[in-house]
Amino acid sequence: MLRRACHGRPSSPCRHARMSAQPSSLDSPPQPGPAPLPHALRTAGAADGTKPPIEGAGPIDASPSAREAAARSVPQPDTRSPADRYQELFVEVQRQRVFEDSKTFVDCAPLMPPEEILGAYRAEQGRPGFDLAAFVHRHFAPPRSACERATAPPGLPLAAHIDALWDELARHPAHHPHRGSLLELPHAYVVPGGRFVEMYYWDSYFTMLGLVPSDRPRLLHAMTDNFAYLIDTYGHVPNGTRTYYLSRSQPPVFALMADLCESTRGQGALRYLPQMLREYAFWMDGADGLADGGVHRRVVGLPGGHVLNRYWDDRDTPREESWREDMETAAACTRPASEVFRNLRAAAESGWDFSSRWLDDLNAAATRTACLAGICTTRILPVDLNALLHASETMIARLSRESGDTATAGEFDGRAARRAEAITRFLWNDEAGAFLDYDWGNRVPRPALNGATVAPLFTGTATLAQARALAATVRRRLLVRGGLATTEIASGEQWDRPNGWAPLQWMGAEGFARYGDQDEICRRLAQDIRERWLATVRHVYDQEGRLVEKYALGEGDGEASAGGDGGEYPLQDGFGWTNGVVRGWLDDPAWKG
């Protein structure tokens, strides 16, 4: 396993959502503050949304005034992270391993005000016989697993199992424990599963793909309204709905969520345009006037006046949910600890935590002798991030034009065109026949191919010629018996071979399918990725009666796929984005024939 520390352009991406649905209306921590809005909508209003009961309840008042009132009624949360709230108590609980999983304590619900708990600890901790674990269990309630009945009754069809799981994974803010680290939300939502008992950003988009086929469009709209509320409240979508996630985001998929809502005929994407603009301003903060080689938070200046984006985190301390792991990584390395922490956090913003994709020494990663102390995430311009921002720019331009704001439409048409040009110039590699991440510090492409290479097809950013070339590369280097491999390197980290992940399967199959009407090779590859992934999920489901977070993909004939492994925590059941992608593909008429 990869060691923790060193010793020594076509149509919308939402192809699948062609079915009709009944209209429904259910729907830096914090410094530095929200980024300024693009000038065109700098004074745009807040998101609207309703205060829903759990999915399936009666009619909801969908008027803008009711939605705004519901959002205003959400209590203002204490946004301090657990490390800030509990200070030396937090450090001792993590250091002494009161809980085996570092995430458990930061998710615990305090049974009295945090200030009183910290005061009690300071008064008691020096007394003879003080028992830290007993103190913690007296003052905190640990979280429950997000999916306690993930195993299906024997013989239940896969689609029926997924349909039943939505109720297991659904949460309502009214049920949030008081004073915990959960961020308040106005509406119901779906969590991933297992140890992940809060709403996550990019997970949720792929989870939401299955809600309409499961006849849950109201929950889809409710979740999108939640994300709009988060942007209005914090200026961006946090990694997840915990206070300790506020300093970073995740791959920006809010525009795609809005597109999903539009495709269900429940509520148009235009109503989310103010939040799209505000989120875009967050990602582009500091971009204006950025010179070649200039960097600021998530933007990097490149030759020719181009600007592309990187992942970042506004903090440079250990991740609170992985405090022990990050401290161990930094302790045995010669780099400044703050630099290591920042890059670990930036990788968490990518959603790929962790992968050889972010490591400086790829040769060591391939032999499982690399370490996360060599992580260099902030030095890398990722293919997927920039493709998703291109999709956001394209969507903002279209919606602005629909609203009659031709000035903003023209501005974002230009932004999208410039980004597409930069993606081809810096991220497309003719020799590899693939989109590759770019090391902006050393001004060279990253040599290792990974599954994010398909993102510019998913967003329609790629040309047909690029799609054709990439199809040949992916079939030769990443397609295996069980689906689309994440990378070519088996490092022991979870976002590396042999693991396969639902979001990459979706972006790969749907991406190549976008170009399939013009290219038979792309069409066949799209079908192969989809069929192989469904076969992988079905095989594990038939064997174990569950869907899981990731899968170890069978590579060749006779090698069966299984549940995945590696990383900082055990394999999790549930599982939101696996459920959503599989349910989105089952019985989809777009894939027939």
Image (cartoon, rainbow, N blue to C red):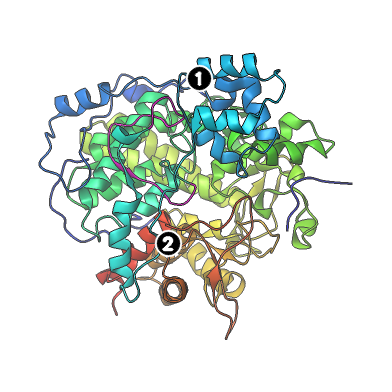
Looking at the picture, does residue 243 appear above or below residue 459? above
Task: Classify residue 71 by image quadrant.
Answer: top left
Q: Are marks 2 and 1 in contact (CB under 8 Å)?
A: no
x and y percentages locating residue 192 in the rendered image? 42, 50
Q: Is residue 68 left or right of residue 90?
A: left
Check disc 1: other Cα within 10 Å, few if <14, some if 14-19, many if 20+.
some
User: Which residue is disc 1 drawn over?
Assistant: 114
Q: Which of marks 2 and 1 is nearer the N terminus?
A: 1
Residues drawn in magenta: 177-195
Looking at the picture, does residue 572 appear above or below residue 73? below
Q: How many labels does the image show?
A: 2
Q: Can residue 16 be seen in this view?
A: no
Looking at this view, is 95 or 82 the one in front?
95
Residue type for callout 2: Trp
x and y percentages locating residue 450 in the rendered image? 60, 59
x and y percentages locating residue 427 in the rendered image? 59, 51
Looking at this view, is 88 or 263 the one in front?
88
Question: Residue placed at 29% from the left, 24% from the top?
Answer: 74
Q: Can residue 486 be seen in this view?
A: yes
Q: In this view, does 360 lie to the left or right of 233?
A: right
Image quadrant where one finds the C terminus: bottom left
In this view, the residue farthest toward the bottom is 558
User: Which residue is disc 2 drawn over?
Assistant: 506
Name the secondary structure under disc 1: helix
Question: Residue placed at 24% from the left, 43% from the top?
Answer: 221
Looking at this view, is 17 or 119 the one in front?
119
